[in-house]
Amino acid sequence: MEEDTKVVYCRHQFSKRPNLLKKLWKRRWIAIHFEDKPTADPDAYGPKGRNALRRLKKYCETGVIVAADFHIIQPSSMLIGLIPAGSPIKLWRHVEPGSDTHIYKIYKVVSLKKARKVSFVSHPLLAAIQPQQGTIMRWRMAEEYVKAIFHRRPLPCNVQSLTAGQLEVICYEYLRGRGDIDALLLPIGRSLLNVDIVGIDRNGRTVFAQVTQAPDESQVADKVARLRNYEDPKTRLLFFGPTKPATIDDGSILHVPLDQVFDELRRDPGSTTYKMLERMLNPGG
């Protein structure tokens, strides 16, 4: 069933071939290219091509939802569509305009069904959490979000539906709304090792906050220990997590359950934070 289908990310890096990309986009095709061999057999290629083709072959056999990057010609959007189970990999010989007709490249292409353009204006998260390397791979971080877009449905209304970056944002908004933090000192989530929010409060104290969904007690204990390294008379430490860790046994760190943050921000339907969560949870709307 499509509801259970996995999500993959496909990157098109043909920077010198915009005409090629335009044809792929118009036809709703994804393509990979490593060597100009007239076969889609992975074993005929070198390591990189072999691995990419093996993944593509498996995805065509099982069926997947694809989020395809065409940033060279579509910098603020991507294509999301379905590869039905049992889809073929086709060989496509493409001649660049102005080239000799006998000089062509052989692309391995797959047709997407029910494909449509999805804008980063409406879905900025898609631009923020893309894989940094690779041609085609599972996109686990965005899986539920992309499924919600494809099926045009909302995500479940709970904390578990949010990505790590979104959790950091809602915890910052919670702190700001309560007056526990007045200004940021560093970007959220990219500041210090295992510290996600760094700011100052109205009294000039430095606020350090850790945000995690980790259910494993050993992982939580490690994060708490790292957060405790910032303990100082001039700091305030907060730990946002699913439950109160047993390792927080003193007053140096304030534990705030993520469910409490979520409920607080959704309390007033007229508030901006309520609308923020609605946007996060309703990508298919």
Image: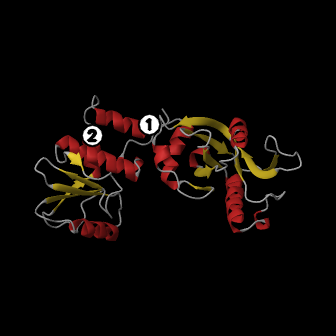
- Is 224 situated above or below 137? below
Q: Are marks 1 and 2 in contact (CB under 8 Å)?
A: no
Q: Which residue is mark 2?
A: 265
Residue furthest to the front in view is 98
Amino acid type indicated by mark 2: Leu
Assess disc 1: are there few (<14), some (14-19) or many (≥20) residues with their C-alpha within 10 Å of its C-alpha.
some
Q: Which residue is located at x 77 percent, y 67 percent? A: 43
Looking at the picture, how far across and down is residue 2, in whole percent? 61, 44
**Quarter assignment of residue 59:** bottom right
Report the front residue among 212 and 158.
Answer: 212
Amino acid type indicated by mark 1: Asn
Residue furthest to the right in view is 102
Q: Earlier in the sequence, mark 1 or mark 2?
A: 2
Q: Which residue is located at x 47 percent, y 35 percent? A: 121
Q: Is residue 213 left or right of residue 19?
A: left
Q: Which residue is mark 1?
A: 282
Q: Which residue is located at x 60 percent, y 58 percent? A: 134
Query: CA separation, marks 1 and 2?
Result: 16 Å
Q: Is residue 234 left or right of residue 141?
A: left
**Quarter assignment of residue 272:** top left
Looking at the picture, how far across and down is residue 165, in whole percent? 38, 51
Q: Is residue 251 left or right of residue 97?
A: left
Q: Is residue 192 visible?
A: yes
Looking at the picture, how far across and down is residue 127, in whole percent? 49, 45
Looking at the picture, how far across and down is residue 52, in whole percent? 68, 60
Assess disc 2: are there few (<14), some (14-19) or many (≥20) residues with their C-alpha within 10 Å of its C-alpha.
many
- Is 182 situated above or below 40? above
